[in-house]
Amino acid sequence: MESARCKAFIESYERGSFKAAAEAMGYTPSAISQLVAALEKDLGLTLLVRSKKGVMPTAEGRKLAPIVRSYLAREKEMYELASELQGVSVGNLTIAAYPSVATTWLPEIVRTFQKDYPNVQFSIMEGVRQEIFQHLDQHVADMGFLAYAEPMDYEWIPLADEQIIAVLPEGHPLADAESYPVSEYINDNFIMTSWGQDLEILNIFRKHNIYPNIKYTTYDTPATLAMVRMGLGISFVNELSAQYWNDHLVKLPLDPPEKITFGIAYTSAEHMTAAARKFLDYAVRYLTQPENR
């Protein structure tokens, strides 16, 4: 049973809303809702009744709550003892991640972790979604940092929501606009990342019945942004990936707004090394603090 799901349930149960639970855990309300829903799916039971006023436990939720609290207490005790017995003094960690995460969040998480565990060695493997899944399936990577999209056949911890934005060259007719209407795609050449298979962007196309003129495809976002900057077309990217690209480029929110949820995927907490479990804790702690995003 995934402890994050249990914690989300107990916090929501005790505080009466996903919003209050999210504030307590440092998550977003949508992330808490997803975690509770995943626990309910695992158990085959409805634990909380949702309404506009908040959440209330079902009869099954009230009966299970004491057991879940006990489970969380025992899990904490287990990891504290395991930490004492094993230690995290040495080890090797392989992290698969989107390039956007590898160049923004990961360096600070690794730096903080290395202060406490300087003898752990790291390998950072940047890649698109298909590559991250392959690294997880082949047990090459201990965990993967990416955006959520179905299907997600791994354990999943949602961490942070990021806006999808339109990136335009400086001379674009909408460069001074407040937002980029998705309907404008008919007037622009589109540049697509991930060899044209960026699932998050493709889902936006499907949602709005968009059939863009995909003039160019690239491997990763930096190549896409460089092409946009040269006036070859426009693109949709997550805001994090364009964080350090500010010259000769215009960034606009989409109209209507769109966002994706970043998180951590891994195959099994049970088979994680002590170093991987500890790094996962550091990553969750860092990314659930709003000031770090």
Image: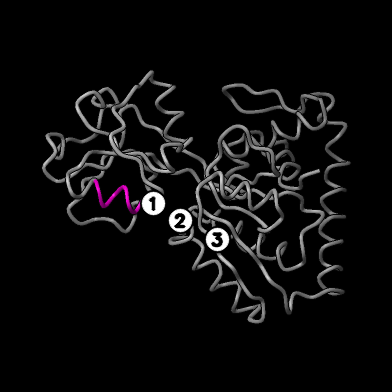
Q: Is residue 159 left or right of residue 58?
A: left
Q: Counting other residues with Cα less than 10 Å from the Cα at mark 3, is it few (<14), some (14-19), or many (20 or more)?
A: some
Query: Closer to us: mark 1 or mark 2?
Result: 2
Numbered mark located on residue 125 in the image: 3
Magenta residues span 221-227
The image shows residue 180 at horizontal and vertical percentages of 25, 32
Residue at horizontal 69 percent and vertical 50 percent from the top: 266
CA separation in Å, label 3 and label 1: 16 Å
Residue 43 lies in quadrant: top right
Q: Which residue is mark 2?
A: 99
Q: Which residue is mark 1?
A: 241
Amino acid type assigned to the residue bearing label 1 in the image: Ser
> Marks 1 and 3: in contact by CB < 8 Å?
no
> Marks 2 and 3: in contact by CB < 8 Å?
no
CA separation in Å, label 3 and label 2: 9 Å
Is residue 76 in sight in this rendering?
yes
**Where 111 falls versus 177 (above or below)?**
below
